[in-house]
Amino acid sequence: MTDQFDIDFTARDLDRLVPLARELAERAKGDGITVANVRVAAVQRGLLTGEEQNRKLSYLGGLMKRAGLVSTGQYRRSGIGRSHGNLNQVWVDRRFA
């Protein structure tokens, strides 16, 4: 069961990562991005530590929809070990869908 702290932490992190997801999607145009791409960029920019694992990353699954991106239905391999398949789904800005 998730306590209130976890819910707040999740909402805060999503709100911080939404602009990054949109920026990356706009730069990628029709090639799209994955949650794994956002995670790497977030670590590089200090928005995530890179130490997060398992349930601490479960909120990332909702990031792309919250950012207004559209799934292409395609998947890409990830350099992030043991990542869930949904994190490798390709998403694009609606303008390039």
Image: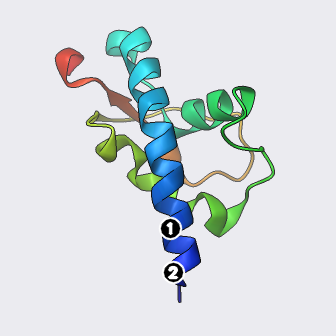
Residue 85 visible from this viewpoint? no
Residue 55 occupies quadrant: bottom right
Task: Pick the quarter of the image with the C terminus.
Answer: top left
Residue in the image at 51% along x and 61% along y: 10
**Disc 2 element:** helix
Reply above or below: 3 against 55.
below
Q: Which residue type does callout 1 highlight?
A: Asp
C-alpha span from label 2 to label 1: 6 Å
Query: Is label 2 in contact with label 1 (beta carbons under 8 Å)?
Result: yes
Q: Residue 4 carries which label?
A: 2
Residue 82, position in %: x, y? 71, 53
Q: Give how far across and how far down residue 74 sits, in percent.
A: 36, 34
Q: Which residue lies furthest to the right in this view?
A: 51
The residue positioned 73% from the left and 34% from the top of the image is 46
- Residue 91 falls in image quadrant: top left
Looking at the image, the residue that sits furthest to the bottom is: 1
87 w.r.t. 93: above or below:
below
Q: Residue at x 35, y 11 (%)?
A: 29
Tell me the kind of residue under disc 2.
Gln
**Residue 70 seen:** yes
